[in-house]
Image (spheres, rainbow, N blue to C red):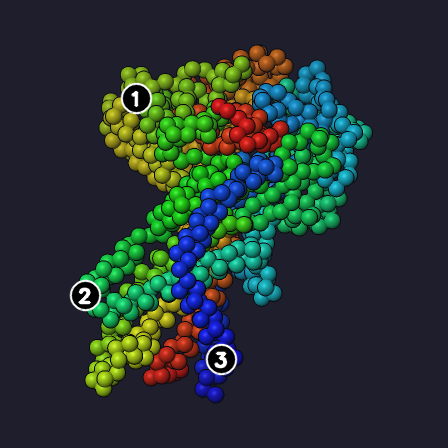
Amino acid sequence: MLNMINSSRSFNRVQSFIQQGTIKARAFVFVAVFFASCEKRESKVDRATREGILLLANGGEPKALDPHLVSSVGDSNILRALFEGLVTYDPTSDSVHAPGVAESWVPNADFSEWTFHLRNDAKWSNGDTVTAADFVYSYNRILHPDMAAPYASMLFFLKNGEAFNKGKITNFAEVGVKAVDPHTLVCTLEDPAPYFPDVVKHTTWLPIHGPTLEKFGKMTDHFTNWQKPGNHVSNGAFQLDDWKINAHVKVRRNPHYWDTANVKPNGINFLPIDNIYTEERAFRGGLIHYTYSLPSNMIEWYEKNQPEVLQIETYAGIYFLRCNTTKAPTNNVNFRKALAHAIDQEVIVKYVTRGGQKPASGFTPPSEGGYQPPNQIKFDPELARKYLKEAGYKSGADVPSFTILINTSEAHKAIAEAIQDMWKKHLGIKNVDLGNQEWKVFQQTIQDIKYDVARAGWIADYADPSTFLNMWKTGDSNNQTGWSNPEYDRLLKESAQLSKAEERYAKMFEAEKVLLNDSPVLPIYWYTRVYLISPDIENWNPLILDNHPYKHIGLRKGASTK
Amino acid sequence: METVRFMAWRFLQSLFALFCIITITFFLARAIPGSPFLDEKAVPAHLIDLMKAKYGTDQPLQIQYLRKIKSLLSGDLGPSYGNKGFTVNEIISQSWPVSALIGTVGLALALSIGIPIGVLAAANANTRIDYTLMTLAMAGICLPTFVIGPLLAKWLALEWKWLDVAGFENSTAWILASLTLGLYYSAYIARLTRGSMLDVLSRDFIRTATAKGVSRMAVLFKHAFRGGISPVVAYLGPALASIIAGSFVVESIFGLPGLGQHFVKAVTNRDYPLIEGTVTLLATLVLIMNFIVDMVQVWLDPRSTLKS
């Protein structure tokens, strides 16, 4: 009964409200206020800029926040914010070595032993001091056979690192890393490496905090709670604040960091958006400062309409095809050369990929003022046909059928179709098929060398040509073509003994010529990074390895004017 | 008594079905070629062997299976191979509420749009109203979510700025996701409702009611409606289960951290524990929903009995 009275009362109130003459005016005011509030609402990006928080799209969800369990580029971006290695990245150039935990470092005469002098004020995010022993502990962990770290091979630079990882020796003391005192670390290498400071910048060489790790499990456990927010301890400019799967990884300023006074952002939110169209919409909708990539069909629109947010930069990576050198027809070197010279790379970058990529005339991407690869692979249909004859085929029609294998993706398919067409047109090869396999199946096929020709990509781990050339050494796990040339192995080994950059580069140049002459790989193009970036971000410079040290990145409304 | 016996019987049936699903999933997942330990940058063979040993995938399948069943019985779905910071239990408990919210709101929208449209079309069968509504519904069924989603994103978020275009935390993008799902399902529900309403409206008891002078509204809602929405309810069970288990497409379009993406990514990563976890959850939901639907249908249509 009471309810009825109440409801009839409110009904009356509504009725009288409707009968008032001002109803239209009220509705109008309400609607106007609603829309005005929509219009004026501060966008997420504006708010983040004001608060000094970088909002970065970061591709997919990170596999882990443990430097010894990851291998992808996106994962290493987050780890670079959380941790700091001996040497770290410079915001302006990849060839500059910024001091990290190490204040200084000196090699011996032949670059086979490096002494790192650690700063006294380097601290973990819980206040503990970072010591040389922490680095020894970390390198023991990643190399330990029980750890089974997927990217342990990055530490095979250390003397006996590989032997320890393979269980051939069991005493870690025999591995080439020693803490001479709490602030002096000595690394003894398997082969001399004048570029060693470049190597130790890599994610796999970051230190971890042993006591934290062992609070939650054994040293070599993969699944413990040490990576959880609140438990995670790191030594970089930022510390972990929150991690929700597929939602975000939030890092905030680490108050114990030795250089915290010079850390510009207050924090970074890494957002795992793996749909490239979604991240572009998120950028347009004012939700992120930076996209991880940009769909190639949108490049033209941004060039025309919003060039101030579009970035196209050289990136140290190569798109290429692997040839199976263990079976016909690709076991014939002249046939492979015919294929290499019949690919019109210019057409592919201009009409298929459309992201400003450079046709690859060699394998290693050229670096400004550094290593220049041999200018050897060029589109030349005449030469290609000559090689085809030398391979013993009167015409392309005689070539037995073979398949270009790709992992399932529209982008790879478009490139493979273009190449298939070029081989038909310039060499008359009729029997080229396209095959596609799901990602993990594809990886297995490549590893087992059960393909004819297959697409591949490679991104530099560190700023030295050896990151592109070492993989073609006999038996390297990334070779996967069956190709082997003692001359190549010898030249690379010799190059590792040379301390002067020019002499080393000259030897590597010779080695790369051997590689290109044998053509187990067909270079297509050198990568670019294409992405969108907010004008609020300052001090973000093009870097060929794309490893930005976030502590230098500033945020100011409308800061950068391109 | 009969009800209790029916429920107990159905419960046992469901349990058996669940056990079969878990077993089949376990062996199917491991039958897919490729390994969870492969990576774009080649992992040396000795490290792959070490990882297999560490994760126990080097053991014979039957031993792995027994271990799995044992851990499932204790409610532990195991660690995720692809997301090494999380257990499968944590992934599900973080992601499922997101999907459940989007799905429930989406389905509520679908019902509140679809059923009235279906009834309206049936009440005006073969008139212009009917044709217009059914053409719209047909268009709705033909437009997949990956077309509706970006369209809604473009207009509601980017042009008119009413809602956020992506994200979940402090974000309104989930409404767009619900709307996308709601529109898609409402089209199907509208057609289903129209069909079965027409069927009921042509029955003798409706004609009798009309002849007796019962008003058109009363005929529609009092006499025809209960029987008319019976097929919708039957459809709703499995639909609700799959809609609240998440949608890969919709979550991907709006960058939402729901469960739907894990169904796909778990397979791509060969993340066996996560595959098993997500499938077990979906199967349980479907079984529960089917059970509820059976009960509701008996209530809706007194002629059907628990035995049938």
Residue topped by disc 2: B127
What is the x, y in percent for residue A231? Answer: 69, 48
Q: Nearer the viewer, mark 3 or mark 1?
A: 3
Chain containing mark 2: B
Q: Are marks 3 and 1 in contact (CB under 8 Å)?
A: no
Q: Residue at left 60%, top 25%?
A: A91
Q: Nearer the viewer, mark 1 or mark 2?
A: 2
**Is A211 left, or right, of A268 in this rendering?**
right
Q: Are marks 2 and 3 in contact (CB under 8 Å)?
A: no
- Circle 2 — which element? loop
Labels 3 and 1 share a subunit: no
What is the x, y in percent for residue A226? Answer: 68, 47
In the image, B234 versus A373, the foreground residue is B234
- In this picture, is A555 found above or below A361? below
Q: Which mark is residue A388?
A: 1
Residue type marked 1 = Leu
Q: Residue at left 53%, top 39%?
A: A45
- Circle 1 — which element? helix
In the image, A21 versus A393, the foreground residue is A21
What is the x, y in percent for residue A273? Answer: 49, 43
Q: How many marks?
A: 3
Q: Which mark is residue B8?
A: 3
Q: CA distance from mark 1 to mark 2?
A: 71 Å
Q: Are marks 1 and 2 in contact (CB under 8 Å)?
A: no
Tell me which corner region of the image, top left, top right, bottom left or bottom right, holds residue B294.
Answer: bottom left
